[in-house]
Image (tube, helix red, strand yellow):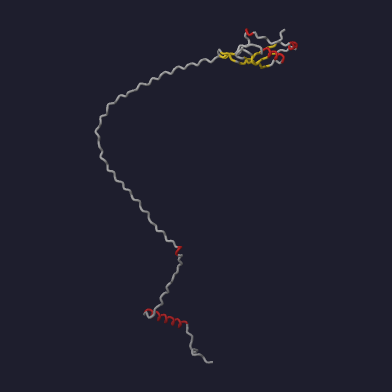
C-alpha cells in the first residue's frame, strides 16, 4: 500500500497552532488599521406595533379653559362736601292742653224683680166645709181592724175631688175602701198661686182607731 502525499508530514503542535492564529490575527488587525477591509454594517432592527381600528380610537376632547368672569368695576364714590347749617332757634315749649275726662253717667239702679207669687196647697180641714168622717165598717169593729190610710187626691180649681188614689194602705181592704168612698164626696179649699185658684194634688191621711 502506497502512502499519501502528506503521510510524511508531522502533526502541528499546540504551540505552533497558537502561533499561526496569532499571526493571522495580527495580519487582520493591520489590514483593518490600513482600512483595506471593512466590517459589515450592523443590521437595522424593525419594530412592529399593533394599532387599534380607526373607529375604536376616540380623539381626546379638546379641553377649553373657562373664560374668566369680567370683574365689575364700581366707580369710587366722590365724597360730597359737608354743609353746616346755621343753628335754628328752638321754638318755645307749647303748653299741653289736657282734655277734661268724659263724664260717665251713673248706671240706673237695677229694678228688683217682682216677688214670685206664693203657691198654697189645697185644704180639707176647714171647718166650714162640713166634710163627713169615713164610716167604720161593722165587720172591721168586730175583727178589731185598725190602721191609717193615706189617700192622694187631685183637687180642681173649684174645690172638687177630681181623682182619689190609695197612697198607702191601712192593712184592711174594708177600711181602705171606706176612706176612698168618703173622700170622693169631700169639698176642698183649692190651691192658689198668688190670688188665682189652681188645680193641685194633696195627701189626705185618715186614721181608723177603736176607742174603749
Q: Residue 179 at what x, y percent from top left?
A: 68, 13
Q: Quadrant of residue 19?
A: bottom left
Q: Residue 164 at what x, y percent from top left?
A: 66, 16
Residue occupying the point 43% across, 71% down: 46
Which of the pair 121/85 is nearer the observer? 121
The reply to whether residue 24 is in sight is yes
Q: In which quarter of the image is residue 32?
A: bottom left
Q: Residue 71 at what x, y percent from top left?
A: 33, 49
Number of numbered discs overlaid on the protein picture: 0
Vertical placement of 163 versus 5: above or below? above
Q: Residue 54 at what x, y percent from top left?
A: 44, 64
Which of the pair 82/34 is nearer the observer? 82
Q: Quadrant of residue 191?
A: top right
Which of the pair 42/129 is nearer the observer? 129
Vertical placement of 142 versus 61: above or below? above
Residue occupying the point 44% across, 17% down: 108
Residue furthest front in the image: 158
Which of the pair 54/139 is nearer the observer? 139
Left or right: residue 152 versus residue 46 is right
The N terminus is located in which quarter? bottom right
Amino acid at each position: 500500500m502506497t502512502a499519501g502525499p502528506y503521510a510524511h508530514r508531522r502533526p502541528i503542535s499546540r504551540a505552533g497552532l497558537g502561533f499561526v492564529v496569532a499571526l493571522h490575527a495580527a495580519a487582520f488587525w493591520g489590514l483593518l488599521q490600513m482600512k483595506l477591509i471593512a466590517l459589515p454594517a450592523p443590521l437595522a432592527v424593525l419594530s412592529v406595533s399593533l394599532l387599534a381600528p380607526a373607529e375604536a380610537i376616540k380623539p381626546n376632547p379638546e379641553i377649553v379653559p373657562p373664560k374668566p368672569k369680567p370683574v365689575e368695576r364700581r366707580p369710587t364714590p366722590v365724597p360730597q362736601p359737608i354743609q353746616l347749617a346755621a343753628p335754628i332757634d328752638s321754638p318755645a315749649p307749647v303748653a299741653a292742653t289736657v282734655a277734661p275726662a268724659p263724664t260717665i253717667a251713673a248706671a240706673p239702679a237695677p229694678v228688683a224683680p217682682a216677688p214670685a207669687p206664693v203657691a198654697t196647697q189645697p185644704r180639707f180641714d176647714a171647718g166650714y166645709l162640713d166634710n163627713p168622717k169615713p164610716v167604720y165598717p161593722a165587720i172591721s169593729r168586730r175583727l178589731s181592724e185598725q190602721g191609717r190610710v193615706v189617700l192622694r187626691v187631685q183637687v180642681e180649681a173649684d174645690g172638687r175631688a177630681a181623682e182619689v188614689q190609695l197612697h198607702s194602705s191601712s192593712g184592711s181592704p174594708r177600711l181602705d175602701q171606706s176612706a176612698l168612698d168618703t173622700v170622693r164626696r169631700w169639698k176642698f179649699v183649692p190651691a192658689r198661686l198668688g190670688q188665682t185658684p189652681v188645680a193641685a194634688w194633696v195627701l189626705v191621711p185618715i186614721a181608723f182607731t177603736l176607742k174603749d
